[in-house]
Amino acid sequence: MGDSFSEQLMEDSSFLKADRRLDTELVDKVILQLNRIYPQILTDKEATKFRNLDVPTNVRLGELLTHLQRKGEEACREFYRALHLHVEEVYYSLPTRLRLRDSLDPLTSPSVIQQRYVLNDRGPLFFLGSFSFAVGIALLYYYSESKLSGGSRALGMAALGLKRKAQEVLIWYTEESFIK
């Protein structure tokens, strides 16, 4: 990565303090993660201090960041892990992450080419027209069958080119209409 986590946290701290997506609940989740999983990084007394709701969230976050920088490299790395776990969208919008993503050399890492898969490039009007046509044919068939008996015969003839199960269903349907 080049930079140490402490240096990255120093660079990202102004962004984190100003970001409105880090509300009280998310900051508390990160503090609890650090306290419960890594009590050597954040003790119960320190976690209680940083979870004090009387202090504004950005002030508490700023104090937490300076505390973690004083604790060392391991504490900063675990803060980034907790941030990635609980607030992924903020993690990926950090200045150091954006710089790291932009600085990747396209010759050393394979680039992912986004392809758009188009199933039908004719648009929504074509779909609506086709659907309306199919509904019209279905309604025409439904209402004309009661008046004409030839519709059921045509259905029986349509069964000739189909698989066995579909033939049985269509032939059964035509036989039912002859019985009526």
Image (cartoon, rainbow, N blue to C red):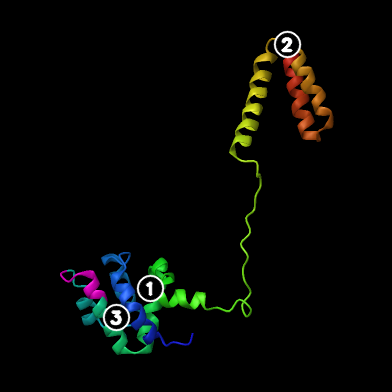
Note whether 133 is above or below 65 in the view shown.
Answer: above
For marks 1 and 2 on the same chain, the one whose residue lies earlier in the sequence? 1
Sequence-wise, which precedes: disc 3 or disc 1? 3
Which residue is the extreme one toward the top?
147
Q: Residues within 10 Å of mark 2 (few under 14, many from 20)?
A: few
Which label number is shown at residue 163? none
Please report the residue visible at 31 percent of the width from the left and 86 percent of the height from the top: 69
The span from disc 3 to disc 2 (Cα, nearest Å) is 82 Å
Residue at which label 3 appears: 65
Q: Secondary structure at mark 1?
A: helix
> Which residues fall within the magenta stretch?
54-61
Q: How many marks?
A: 3
- Indicate which label's residue lies in the foreground, 3 or 1: 3
Q: How far is disc 3 from disc 1 in space, using C-alphas?
A: 12 Å
Residue 172 lies left or right of residue 54; in this view the side is right
Front disc: 1 or 2: 1
| Principal secondary structure, stretch drawn in magenta | helix
Classify mark 1: residues with Cα within 10 Å, few (<14), some (14-19) or many (20+).
many
The residue where tag 1 is placed is 83
Identify which residue, 46 or 119, lies in the foreground: 119
Residue that label 2 marks: 148
The reply to whether the magenta stretch includes residue 118 is: no
Q: Residue at x 19, y 69 (%)?
A: 56
The amino acid at mark 2 is Leu
Would residue 85 be seen by someone viewing this image from the given angle? yes
